[in-house]
Image (cartoon, rainbow, N blue to C red):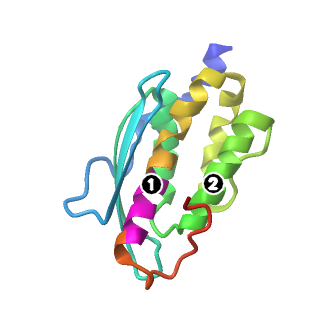
Amino acid sequence: MIDELYSARILRLAANLPHSGRLPAPEGTGERVAKLCGSKAVVDVTLDDAGRVLAFAQDVKACALGQAAAGVLGESVIGASLDELIDARDAMSVMLKSGGEGPTGRFEGLRALKQVADYPARHASTMVAIEATLDAMRQAIARKGPDTRTSLAGAA
């Protein structure tokens, strides 16, 4: 059963971490740690005038599942809005906890992690990169001020 969890696809995603590193002058930075296993993601972003991700960098130290989720996120995040990331995070959470199908649209690749639902101890590590990205975006939006044309739904 553990072999299914660490499938060739998951390991391939984990080995490919797009936008690895840090941005020299981020508008927002988010950091999340999964307390149970210590998986950690630090994400930097800059946003365009519409509040979409213009530049993105991630420093992720996580298990293969957390790395795989960060890999999918890194492939798809440029151009994403806060609402798209919130929707992806919420769909990912439902997928892991309640048997949902997972994210659609630009973040549909996160569905590759559906089998993680059977391992609750791994849920937090799978979510660290997307949660850190949301934190970074919220910080960047707050710094840019009210002219940033994006929804702040779920920003609380």
Residue annotated with mark 1: 135
Q: In the image, is residue 49 above or below residue 96?
A: below
Q: What element carries label 2?
A: helix
Majority secondary structure in the magenta region: helix
Q: Can residue 109 be seen in this view?
A: yes
**What span is colored magenta in the figure?**
133-142
Task: Quote the CA–CA distance across marks 2 and 1.
Answer: 14 Å
Image coords of residue 63 (percent x, y): 45, 26
Mark closest to the chain's N terminus, 2 or 1: 2
* Mark 2 crowd level (few <14, some 14–19, many ≥20, 10 Å Cα): many
Please tell me the numbered disc located at residue 1: none
Quadrant in which residue 155 is drawn: bottom right
Q: Is mark 1 on a helix, strand or loop?
A: helix
Report the amino acid beneath label 1: Asp
Q: Quadrant of the N terminus?
A: top right
Residue closest to the far bottom: 147
Q: Residue visible at 61% across and 49% down?
A: 109
Quadrant in which residue 62 is drawn: top left
| Image-based side of 86 in relation to 30, left or right | right
Image coords of residue 18 (percent x, y): 38, 50
Q: In terms of depth relative to the viewer, which is nearer, 11 or 88?
A: 88
Residue annotated with mark 2: 88
Image coords of residue 64 (percent x, y): 47, 28
